Image (spheres, rainbow, N blue to C red):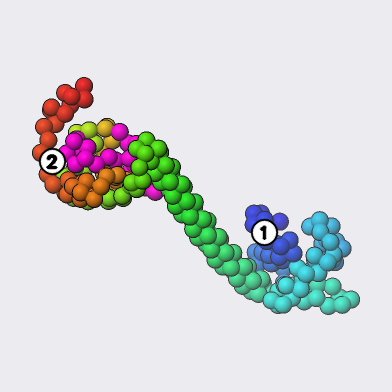
Amino acid sequence: MSNYTANDMPRYLRIAVDIAERIATGEIQQGTKLKGRSVLSSEFHVSPETIRRSMAILADMNVVKVSAGSGIRVLGQDQAIQFVRNYRSAASVKEMRDDLHRKFDEVARVQEEARQLSDKLLEHYQYRRGDLIEPVEIPMPTDSPLIGLSIGQCQVWLRTGATIIGVVKHNKIIVSPGPYYEFSADDKLLVVGDEDVIERMRLFLTEEPNIDLQEVKLSEN
């Protein structure tokens, strides 16, 4: 019997496909009289009613002919081949649809996790500061001269007054990135500060930094 792993596929359909595949491959020849329902039900470990439904499907597709008193006879290999092709095509579409649904669910899960982490960040910052300033998300310009430099090297707070409380990267949030975090082109910075501070931060990300890196490294050490 063929090895089907689709657990949600009805048993009678699996049996119909299995028999059709045997006919399609020539294992069961055209004109062959199949075993009776009771024998088939024992072979497949199902009830005779399940076998009846399987044969009804094959009969509708002209793969077999079911006659009262004459039993079940194979009509043709070509019909069996077409039935198997149709089934596989439908199964492939269902598999792609299920995969798409799983991806949508994964995106929704990541977005929900990002929202929860953002809420925790805000609560954490409000607890420390005792105010109600909300973080502003500032995308790192792809041509920013700060890319590859660390927060500490850029002296962000000293030069802008802004505090980076998190970085959104690949749908994940890095909480309190610290002075050694290096900026990259796909970063989204979560910054807190008043309107002037936020504006200075936006400009700071686009301007060539006037920074003595040697002095910064000495101070870090």
| 175 sits left or right of 10 in the view | left
Frontmost residue, 219 versus 181: 219
Asked if 22 appears above or below 151 in the picture, the reply is: below
Query: Are there few (<14), some (14-19), or many (20+) residues within 10 Å of tag 1?
Result: few
Residue at screen point 11% across, 32% down: 212
Q: From where the camera sits, is residue 174 visible?
A: no
Q: Which contiguous range is marked in magenta?
A: 155-178
| 143 sits left or right of 130 in the view | left
Q: Secondary structure at mark 2?
A: loop
Q: Is residue 173 magenta?
A: yes
Frontmost residue, 109 versus 47: 109
Circle nearer the N terminus (2, 1): 1
The three-letter amino acid code for the residue at tag 1 is Asp
Q: Would you name the residue on which mark 1 appears?
A: 8
Q: Secondary structure at mark 1?
A: loop
Q: Position of residue 183 (x, y in %)?
A: 25, 41
Residue at screen point 81% across, 59% down: 46
Q: Position of residue 107 (x, y in %)?
A: 46, 54
